[in-house]
Image (cartoon, coloured by chain):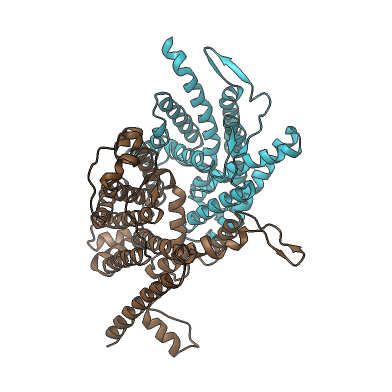
Chain colours: A cyan, B brown
Amino acid sequence: MDFISKNLPYLLAGISVGGQYALIAIGYTMVYGILRLINFAHGDIFMVAALVTVYSTTVMPLYLSIPLTLIVTVALGLLVERAAYKPLRSAPRMSVMISAIGVSYLLQNLALYVTGGLAQTYPSIPFISNTVQVGPATTKMVTLVTPILTIILVFALMQLINHTKIGMAMRAAANDFETSRLMGIKVDNVISVTFLIGSFLAAVGSLLYFTNYASVIPTSGAMPGLKAFVAAVFGGIGSIPGAVIGAFIIGICENIIKGLGWTTFSDAFTFALLIVILIFKPTGLFGEGATDKV
Amino acid sequence: MNKKRNTVIAALLLLAALALILILERILPPTHIALAVLKKGCIYSLVAVSMNLLNGFTGLFSLGQAGFMLIGAYTYAVLTIPAADRGSVYMYYGGGIIHFSVPVIVGLLAAGLLAALFAWLIGLPVLRLKSDYLAIATLGFAEIIRAFFQWDELGVITNGSNMLRKYPSFSTTLYPFIVSAVCIGIMVLIINSSYGRAFKAIRDDEIAAEAMGINLAKHKRMAFCISSFFAGIGGALLAMYQTSIQAATFRSSMTYEILLIVVIGGLGSVTGSCIASFLFIASSEWWLRFLDTEMTIGNFHVPLLRAGFRKVVFSVIIMAIVLFARNGIMGNREFSINGIFRFFKNPGKKKEVKQ
């Protein structure tokens, strides 16, 4: 009993962070599935979403500011895709990745300019910021809301992918980009929808994630972004359930490590896990194997 | 004949650069920004060329450069802090456990060697991965290295998350210039050797290279270690330049900056990397600085100008280069004296430089 009451807060925090990572990881895994691109700017889009919330709540009520955040983030995601990735569609994969790193650099510097380098206090969102008592542990409502919301969103997304026309187009494009183009699928639209969904989920993730943290700085998207990417690789890149399970595992492990007093290594653990999985099962938990052709 | 002439001209150019630095040091006050830019430019050239050796010449897309620089910087600092000053530097760790210090040159070499050793160890598992998986794994290793150096238990050696300082540094710009020039020279010799040709073959087509009898694992590991060795020395120079270091500053954004320099200069061009380093440092620290201060022309208050705007403009320029001038300044060509001659002989024709 003592063990549980001591570790329950960390476990709860882990599940909550895991859900937030999952929402970001879906963006990575879907983009990678279709474009074979690690979208390094995704974490920064997540950070921009938080900044939009911060700034919009100062001039408008929350029920307007949250939809605005979602819309602006989605627009930004689409803009980045159109401006930075689309012109490089026929370029080598590394050029696109470098472009993504450039976008990340740009977004961070833009955020630095807008915020003036000061940490911005994140507004407290009613209901999900409330504290709640779970057994022996006190936590915020967001801890309970996150996993439920994550599961609902993932379920909706799976329905979209498995049972709609655009979902079928996405699966086709992920399977074989060139052939699906030949089959008359407008691949550019499919990619736009992918970025739309990814950015939308990142915005939802930012609402949940930053409720647990006091403030937003221009680099606060980088680490969650990388971890979410690791989660996507862990679960098998391209697979949505894989990304979600990977994210929960990483979130929980990370917080248990913090609970054991190894805070310095909580980030390092994630990357160690990545390297181990890449070496022993490069396709991840649920990934499909690919063979190199000469 | 031509070769002899080129060697002479190259030597003259180097001497001219040296003389220019000497003159600048005489006429400019020691705190002038131009000197700082030159020093940092030299260091970044070295690191950028070392990254280019891996990413541009061998085709291994690694993002671990900041980690190896961190190892180099810390090795140098830990080994060279004078014994008398250790008490004040390691004040939270009872003076640390190292009670000797080595000469600067030994410290520099040790920095490179330790970085190379780590690269060898990391390379064992990581170099089996391809393209973006390799990138993300090396990035991960750089983060793990950073966490280790901030670990409290290692504080007696690394001073935990506190600063390391009071180690010997340089005062003249000639120092980083000469060290970087020698290191870059060695890398050019490697690139032009049979090993370098093997690296390029691996970049162009791994399977064909293997079929031609190139030992992939061996050459990849070699490229990785060489690159890390020089990144380590670059890190040590950076430590000297900054006069104090902290592990927390060697973030992945540092790797991204170096990668962008390499891309701007041209993947696979040593001279491109050098030119781009100086341009990058000069514009980010000096030439664009006017964008950071508010300005009024007549009665017109120029909008947008305030602290941080420089970085925004700068990153927009970088994005433009990445998108529209994908080959960078030099592509995969090299700045060569023959090329200049040809350019002046046939000014009408487009410059074609062969290596």
Q: Residue at x 40, y 81 (%)?
A: B339
Of residues B235 and A37, the one drawn nearer to the viewer in this rendering: B235
Residue A172 x %, y %: 53, 46
Q: Residue at x 48, y 18 (%)?
A: A8
Of residues B166 and A201, the one drawn nearer to the viewer in this rendering: B166
Residue B262 x %, y %: 43, 62
Residue A215 x %, y %: 59, 36
Of residues A64 and B170, the one drawn nearer to the viewer in this rendering: B170
Q: Residue at x 55, y 32 (%)?
A: A20
Asked if residue B355 can be seen in this view, the reply is no
Q: Residue furthest front?
A: B84
Asked if residue A77 can be seen in this view, the reply is yes
- Please give left or right for residue A105 compared with residue B141 in the image: right
- Please give left or right for residue B24 compared with residue A130 in the image: left
Q: Residue furthest bottom?
A: B345
Using the image, determine if residue B16 lies above or below residue A208: below
Q: Quadrant of the N terminus of chain A?
A: top left
- Please give left or right for residue A63 compared with residue A131 in the image: right
Q: Quadrant of the C terminus of chain A?
A: bottom left
Displayed quadrant of residue A144 = top right
Displayed quadrant of residue A54 = top right
Question: How many numbered circles are shown?
Answer: 0
Q: Residue at x 61, y 44 (%)?
A: A48
Residue B238 x %, y %: 38, 55
